[in-house]
Image (cartoon, rainbow, N blue to C red):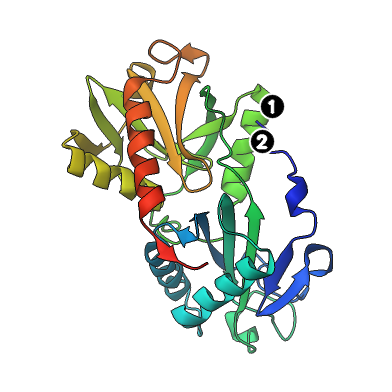
Amino acid sequence: MLQKFDERNRDLIVNINGRLVHRDEAGISPFDSAVHGGDAVWEGLRLYNGRIFKLNQHLDRLERSARALSFVEVPPREKIVDEIRRTLAANNMRDGVHIRLTLTRGPKITSGMDPRLNQSGPTLIVLAEHKAPVYATTGLSLITSKMRRSPPEILDPRIHHANLLNSILAKIEANNAGANDALMLDTRGFIAETNATHVFIVRQNALATSRVVACPEGITRATVLEICVAEKIPCTETDLTLDDAYAADEVLCTGTMGELAGVIQIDNRIIGPGQIGPMTKRLSDLYAQRTASEGVKVV
């Protein structure tokens, strides 16, 4: 499941601190904190027919994460939204777009770890691409990674930071095993999430998902929980074991880049009937109804 290059993205205009440049000419300082330790926070957004779904929730999380990392300065929300609008307009984009929003601590006066070396304010990067949901609609295969998700006392997962090596190492394991993604456990042995998405299981028409202990507070995850309440679908947040996933009727993953995606195999074990199940299809349809009608208009 390797993403393919979309020819429409060949001449993308990228926004670096308000400067709109061709993707081949874009760049940040080698002294930027994103280069020195992945010292940055980020959000993935989706544009549906001129609206960004859950934009305010994403910007809330971006600001919380930046404050948790003691960023001295965070651009005003109005400024961030304006730069998103300018970037979309420059690329003539309206639908089927994924936006990677990155806020770094900014450039340092000299290389080093100390945040006091950052004296020029943050760097805001808006990268908008033509990108459909990235997961196959026929179902995903997962393997369980040897990499573990850290607990809050090591690094709070609610901080949506850009140091993703833990996830990248798990993804490498999945690639080597010929799987689509890797299921990651916490240090207690319970399911946290995959290397890129949150996980739900379905059993007897009820859903369960991992507690937010070693995984971030996902926006798409929260939307699925909202849908369950609205539709009176039983759903619990609890500790999930691998056996819970193996024995589930259905397993699905949730995330902004891939939306909702069914899982049909984990560690060479077939999940349920080995095809996308009715609950996953129902939730996907309900999610699509929301993205088609909700969101902040930016185009």
The answer to whether 9 appears left or right of 213 in the picture is right
Does residue 178 appear in this view?
A: yes
Q: Which residue is mark 1?
A: 176
Label 2: state its secondary structure: helix
In x, y percent, where is residue 104? 60, 72
Q: Closer to the camera, 226 or 174? A: 226
| Amino acid on which the number 2 mark rests in the picture | Ile
Residue at x 68% of width, y 38% of height: 3
Residue drawn at (72%, 38%) of the image = 4
User: Left or right: where does residue 54 sit relative to residue 129?
Assistant: left
Residue visible at 19% across and 33% down?
233
Q: Is residue 188 above or below residue 273?
A: below
Q: Residue 19 location, x and y as percent?
A: 71, 79
Residue 218 visible in image: no
Point out which mark residue 172 bears: 2
**Disc 2 crowd, CA 10 A, few/some/many (<14, 14-19, 20+):** some
Q: Residue at x 62, y 47 (%)?
A: 131
Q: Is residue 232 above or below residue 217?
A: above
Helix, strand or loop for disc 1: helix
